[in-house]
Amino acid sequence: MPKSRVRKDRSTVEAREVLSPLDSIKESPRWFAPVMVAAFLIGLFWIVVFYVSGTNYPIPGIKNWNMVVGFVFIGIGFTFATRWK
């Protein structure tokens, strides 16, 4: 009876192909995490100061837009958090 051909094991070939893109992922720079945390804290501090001061500070002239400024800082922090590796 004739002997069948030996085939390559596909599981090991596919495993190598799946793992190879992970090698190309770079880590974030050292400054990335501190800037992310700072953006979160600045936004939180901005909103807390706004409420504690009776809506007069941090910038008195823009009144309730101070909330938007605080949330923009928090949004920047979230943007950094999604890109952190």
Image (tube, rainbow, N blue to C red):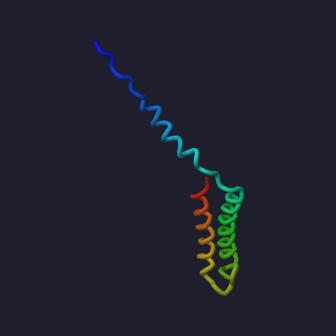
Q: Residue shown at 58%/48% (left/top)?
A: 24
Q: Quadrant of residue 70?
A: bottom right
Residue at the far top in the pictured view: 1
Q: Residue shown at 66%/76% (left/top)?
A: 50
Q: Residue shown at 33%/20% (left/top)?
A: 4
Q: Nearer the viewer, residue 78 or 22?
A: 22
The quadrant of the picture occupied by the N terminus is top left
Image coords of residue 44 (percent x, y): 66, 67
Give the vertical position of 64 relative to 71 (above or below): below
Q: Nearer the viewer, residue 5 or 59?
A: 5
Residue at the far left in the pictured view: 1
Image coords of residue 13 (percent x, y): 46, 34
Q: Residue shown at 57%/58% (left/top)?
A: 82
Numbered-mark total: 0
Give the vertical position of 84 relative to 45 (above or below): above
Image coords of residue 27 (percent x, y): 64, 51
Residue at the far front in the pictured view: 2
Q: Quadrant of residue 73?
A: bottom right
Q: Nearer the viewer, residue 66 or 24?
A: 24
Give the vertical position of 28 relative to 43 (above or below): above
Q: Nearer the viewer, residue 11 or 53?
A: 11
> Would you say 25 lies left or right of 14 here?
right
Q: Quadrant of residue 56?
A: bottom right
